[in-house]
Amino acid sequence: MFIDEAKIYVKAGDGGNGCVSFRREKFIPKGGPNGGDGGKGGSVYLQTVEGLDTLMDFAGKHHWQAQNGKPGSGGNRHGADGQDLIIPVPPGTLIYDTDIDLLLKDMNKVAMKVRICRSGRGGKGNKAFATPTNQTPRYAEPGKKGQERNIRLELKLIADVGLVGMPNAGKSTLISRCSAAKPKIADYPFTTLEPVLGIVELSGFRRYVLADIPGLIEGSHNGAGLGIEFLRHIERTRILVHILDIMPVDGSEPVRNYKAIRNELKLYSKALAKKQEVIVANKIDLDPDGKIVKDLKKRLNKKIYPISAVTGSGIKELTELLWQKVKETKKEYNSGTD
Ligand SMILES: Nc1nc2c(ncn2[C@@H]2O[C@H](COP(=O)(O)OP(=O)(O)OP(=O)(O)O)[C@@H](O)[C@H]2O)c(=O)[nH]1
Ligand SMILES: [Mg+2]
């Protein structure tokens, strides 16, 4: 399971204190109590907002606090109420109370709003305590404390782009290049045993989620290698990036490898095989005069994006291209043609 997580402290506003005050006016010798009530604090709400897709924004801010209520004052003036705090979260966020280890809410709908901390009530002013036997109460009620909680937010990420390819093609190297993900990379097949997610961040707050999965080989659908079940992790992606090693160490043939993987995808699911595919030729640093890539293009007769995940060549172009495609498919999806 791919999980994005944030731990934060939230606190509702305290109520304002009630006020002790007496009416003092000329010609009114014994003015009665006129201390006003304190205002109530603001509550804390979490609300799901369409379009948000990460909890990363919480990394820089751990304390979230709603406004306190203002104290009451003389002349029966009520203190102002504190403002509520509404924290935006992506749809699909789970809220846990970490102190009692309890799931508070599954925010599984858009524009869903829940209160997670109740505000403190304002204290009553001394006016409220006047009785026939005590007409000059010299005390007022303090405001109640706002509720506080330590919560954990959890979001199951859905990848926008899935990486497929033979073992050793350089999938993990690529994801480590264009995101903060740090998967294991090694020069032997099946280094990656579990899917890894990375978030690609581009200028102007553009980002998307990339998934690295274990390598596929011919016969994966029959359980060869690590098998094919990891493909379910990328079934919901919008785009596949098919990584070809232009010079496999095992001496295998890139065009043949390409076809073998395509075949495995088809055998796994027609929907997956129909997804938009970007073919990437990796390790072009091993092909300084570009001969291998040229030959590959000719033989596959498809558009190929040459990169070197190690030197970084072509990566910027690739991440921008993928962004464009993710954006387009999101549009299609929103207009209901997907
Ligand atoms: N020369 C060269 N080597 C690369 C490049 N990209 C990856 N490699 C090397 O290829 C080997 C395999 O890289 P990985 O990123 O682990 O490959 P993978 O596709 O994730 O492999 P599995 O997890 O086993 O499926 C490592 O030794 C990398 O250093 C590249 O652009 N150029
Ligand atoms: Mg790997």
Image (tube, rainbow, N blue to C red):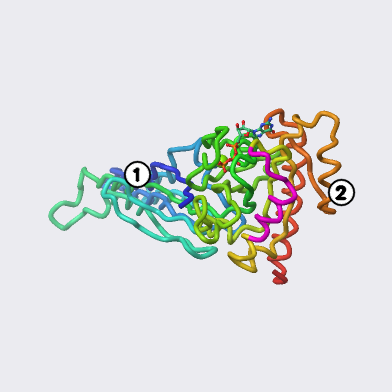
Front-lying residue, 213 or 66: 213
The residue sitting at 77% across, 36% down in the picture is 314
Residue 327 lies, in percent from the top left, at: 72, 55
Location of mark 2 (residue): 298
Q: Residue at x 37, y 44 (%)?
A: 71
Q: Is mark 1 within 8 Å of ligand 2?
A: no
Q: Is residue 292 left or right of residue 105?
A: right
Instruction: Using the rendered view, name the quadrant where residue 204 is placed.
Output: top right
Q: Is residue 160 magenta?
A: no
Which secondary structure, mark 1? strand
Helix, strand or loop at mark 2: helix
Q: Residue furthest left?
A: 133
The x, y position of residue 38, in whole percent, is 35, 48
Give yes or no for contact between labels 2 and 1 (Cβ–Cβ under 8 Å). Answer: no
Q: Residue 167: which quarter of the image?
A: top right
- Can you identify the residue that label 1 sits on? 150
Q: Residue at x 27, y 52 (%)?
A: 127
Residue 308 position, x and y percent, is 72, 34
Q: Amino acid at mark 2?
A: Lys
| Label drawn at residue 231 | none
315 or 338: which is nearer to us? 315
Whether disc 2's CB lies below 8 Å from ligand 1 is answered: no
Between residues 168 and 328, which one lies in front from this camera angle? 168
Q: Tag 1 or tag 2, which sits nearer the N-term? A: 1
Label 2 vs label 1: CA separation? 59 Å
Q: Is residue 83 visible?
A: yes
Find the magenta span and give its range: 250-263
